[in-house]
Amino acid sequence: KGKFVINFSAGPAKLPASVLAHAQKEMLDHQDTGVSVMEMSHRSSEFSKILNSAEHKLRDLLAIPQNYKILFLQGGGTGQFSAVPLNLLPLKPSLSADYLVTGSWSAKAAQEAEKYGTVNLVVPKTKKYTSIPDPSTWKLNPEASYFYYCANETIDGVEFQYIPEINGVPIVCDMSSNMLTRHLDINKFGLIFAGAQKNIGCAGVTLVIIREDLIGLAMKICPVIFDYQIQAGNNSLYNTPPTYGIYIMGLVFNWIDEEGGVKKMEENSIKKSNLVYNLIDSSEGFYHCPLDKDCRSRMNLPIRIGSLQGHETLEKQFSEEATKTGYLQLKGHRSVGGIRVSLYNAVTVEETEHLVGFMTAFMERNR
Ligand code: PMP
């Protein structure tokens, strides 16, 4: 890699350099098989090893109990917006689910679920997502088939620092942008899904972790590739899975393990996000974060410059200087504007310090 860059993309995002180097080394000839992983039959014993070792490593990293299946599917997070209601709405005769909308992605998921059943919005709709309403205000339906939320809203930066307590109703969680970045008690969930392209690999593969007793009631109209029973019964090999993506994911799992596991990822996330938030909080109104402090994301940090609504020329100047410095993808999502810093697992503490140095100097020159 020649050019100096630091990749702060919200996804697809930075991968650990050692993972890319490893993949490069065996790109043409995977462990003396004479072929690339891309050229292997998904039913070969070589690929079986890749799939099984990725699954075992993940089970280890998150202490996933045996009564949970791990699936490697196609279709992205968006595919799972449909797969979840198609598979889980029939868990109760109500064909109704509770959706806690705290940002753009959970809003999209709720909209998709409406095609297949009744969606109960647990909190009132809002235009801006900057907080998580207190659980005591949530209007839960005890007859709901499942309760759905997004652990980290990639666009808005709303992240849960706790797992909701929902009596008796299975919890479904979109962890696309904070999977393997913090400790989790898997037993609290019915289903977790995550696209790979932020913390755990490259685009094309979506991870699903599902409790076995929730499998097997899919609606008749559920497309076969999204039917959890069929995918689980075939060990994700009903049809051709995203083989290369699964291979890269396995390498990322090994990397996380070598680095010190989820615990280390969590420590680093706290350290990195605190570096940026501490600067914002001590900037005397130069930098702003629109979020309530208790739900500020460690992964995707939305920032405004000059004022809470953002000072247009300052933000433009910041973007230009950041690009010149070699920072990639610091622009906020078009729906919220401003700056967004994404600090996924592969972004190092040193890289974050580099950015904070730049932000400090920018502030001193322009306040
Ligand atoms: N959920 C979250 C939290 C996301 O960030 C994204 C993508 N950025 C999605 C779902 C949708 O994933 P995909 O683009 O893989 O369909």
Image (spheres, rainbow, N blue to C red):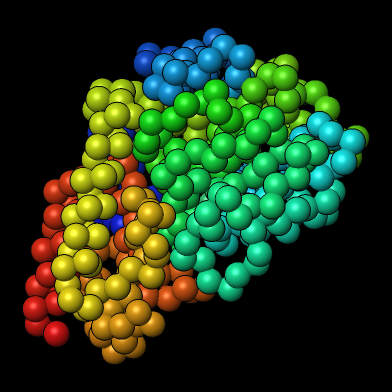
- Residue shown at 47%/61% (left/top)? 131
Position of residue 80 measured from the top left corner of the image (x, y, whole percent): 66, 43
- The quadrant where residue 206 appears: top right
Position of residue 213 measured from the top left corner of the image (x, y, whole percent): 72, 19
| Residue reaching furthest to the bottom | 313
- 29 or 263, nearer to the observer: 263
Q: Dividing the image into 4 quarters, which one contains the C terminus?
A: bottom left
Residue 133 visible, this orientation: yes
Q: Is residue 170 left or right of residue 353?
A: right
- 230 or 33, nearer to the observer: 230
- The quadrant where residue 339 appears: bottom left
Q: Is residue 5 left or right of residue 127?
A: left
**Where is 237 relative to 114, above or below?**
above
- Residue shown at 80%/38% (left/top)? 143
- 184 or 37, nearer to the observer: 184
- Residue shown at 59%/47% (left/top)? 149
Residue 35 visible, this orientation: no
Position of residue 211 measured from the top left corner of the image (x, y, whole percent): 64, 23
